[in-house]
Image (cartoon, rainbow, N blue to C red):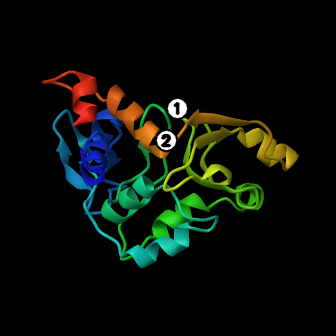
Amino acid sequence: MTDSELIRRFVDCFTRLDDSTFSHNDPPPPEFAAGIDPDDWNAIRWKPASIGAAEASLKVIRRVGPLPRLYELLATSYRWPAVELSVCHLLPNLPADDLTPLAASMFADPVLNNILIPNGFSRFASGPCQSYDCFCFDHNRYDSNDCPVVRINHESVLSEDSVGNVETVFDSFRDLIYAVLAIDPGLFTRRGRQNQLRQ
């Protein structure tokens, strides 16, 4: 399986794992609109959008350094709203000509930035189930084109001005993708999970 195919499968599972919708009073960007929910006419379904971005646009999200190559491929190939993926809550990458909206979501909190960035962490998600804990790429352990995904307790950052305990959640962003795909109920319908992942 190529990296582009892996990313496509990852994005395809977003709406199967996140059942949230938009309302008519607060509609999604038109690029995300996927029609009225047949079970609730007050709700608008959404879907990720295939919108590319130039390699040069990555500069705005590389404040700490290069990000995992798969994440950069994801960011420059697709756009999505904030999405719950069971293992984490992925920050949004909204439609635009560049990645400025993604940078705005990654670096929205100046208090977190003041602690995370100097210590070598890029926040790209929060904890699952509405947790405000920071899911970050650990640039201190960047190797080749990937790095560990760590969870940092937001209380230690906000209350103690410290990174505190750093929990490694996945050894790489690639491992996070595999974990999400393993959860997705719509992916493995014809063959065993391991056979699919090894293609």
As shown in the figure, which amino acid type bears the numbered disc 1? Answer: Cys
Location of residue 159 with respect to 183 vertically, above or below: below
Q: Secondary structure under badge 2?
A: strand
- Of residues 86 and 141, the one nearer the viewer is 141
Whether residue 185 appears in this view of the structure is: no
Which residue sits at x=75%, y=58%? 111
Kindly identify which numbered label has been placed on residue 129.
1
Q: Position of residue 6 (x, y in %)?
A: 29, 46
Q: Position of residue 144 (x, y in %)?
A: 51, 56
Which residue sits at x=80%, y=40%? 164
Q: Secondary structure under badge 1?
A: loop
Asked if labels 2 and 1 touch by Cβ distance under 8 angstroms, the answer is: yes
Indicate which disc, 1 or 2, sits on the residue closer to the N terminus.
2
65 left or right of 87 in image? right
101 left or right of 8 in image? right
- Of residues 54 and 95, the one nearer the viewer is 54
As shown in the figure, which amino acid type bears the numbered disc 2? Answer: His
Extreme-left residue of the structure: 190
